[in-house]
Amino acid sequence: MRHFHALPLAAAALLITTGLSHAQATTGASLSLTLESAGDIERRIVTYQCEDEQALSVQYVNAAPNFLAIVPVDGVNHVFATTISASGARYVSGPYEWWSHQGEGTLRDLMQDEDAEPLATCTEVSNTP
């Protein structure tokens, strides 16, 4: 079972907690990344309901030319960068792929066989009554 958690994010700066050992993590080690954009910087937090009943909170940061998604995988937030896709928005981070399209999101481990089940298949939660 996968556990998903969200990471708070400032509008113009991105704070990423590194995946350090427990001893290093308890010292509060972190990395700060500042994104500069000629245009507006947009930050959206989208909640997804996944098939395994888990809620997944994905943060999208759009600061052209950088388009990022912060997706929690096994309790660790991963920063995904957008890449080419035929449709929807495809993001990658190391071996992981997050693909969102028309309110659906799929998390895959690209190191698994091509026919392997996704790590998570989710539907965007609408706050509209």
Image (spheres, grey):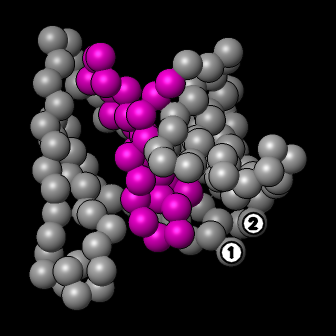
Q: Are marks 1 and 2 in contact (CB under 8 Å)?
A: yes
Q: Say which of marks 1 and 2 sits in front.
A: 1
Q: 10 Å neighbourhood of mark 2: few (<14), some, or many (≥20)?
A: few
Seen from the viewer's position, the closer of residues 23 and 100 is 23
Picture residue at 68% right of the left edge, 26% below the top = 102
- The residue where tag 2 is placed is 52
> Residue 17 bears which disc, if any?
none
Total labels drawn:
2
Which element type, helix, strand or loop, lies under badge 2?
loop
Residue pushed farthest bottom?
23
Q: Is residue 89 above or below residue 30?
A: above
> Residue 1 bears which disc, if any?
1
Q: Position of residue 31 (x, y in %)?
A: 16, 56
Seen from the viewer's position, the closer of residues 128 and 50 is 50
Seen from the viewer's position, the closer of residues 91 and 50 is 91
Picture residue at 29% right of the left edge, 85% below the top = 22
Amino acid type, label 2: Asp
* Left or right, 52 with reference to 46: right
Q: Position of residue 103 (x, y in %)?
A: 66, 33
Residue pushed farthest right?
115
Q: 10 Å neighbourhood of mark 1: few (<14), some, or many (≥20)?
A: few
Mark with earlier residue (1, 2): 1
Does residue 75 show up magenta in the picture?
yes
Q: Position of residue 2 (x, y in %)?
A: 62, 70
The span shown in magenta is 56-83
Amino acid type, label 1: Met
Seen from the viewer's position, the closer of residues 3 and 93 is 93
Q: Position of residue 107 (x, y in %)?
A: 64, 48
Picture residue at 47% right of the left edge, 45% below the top = 93
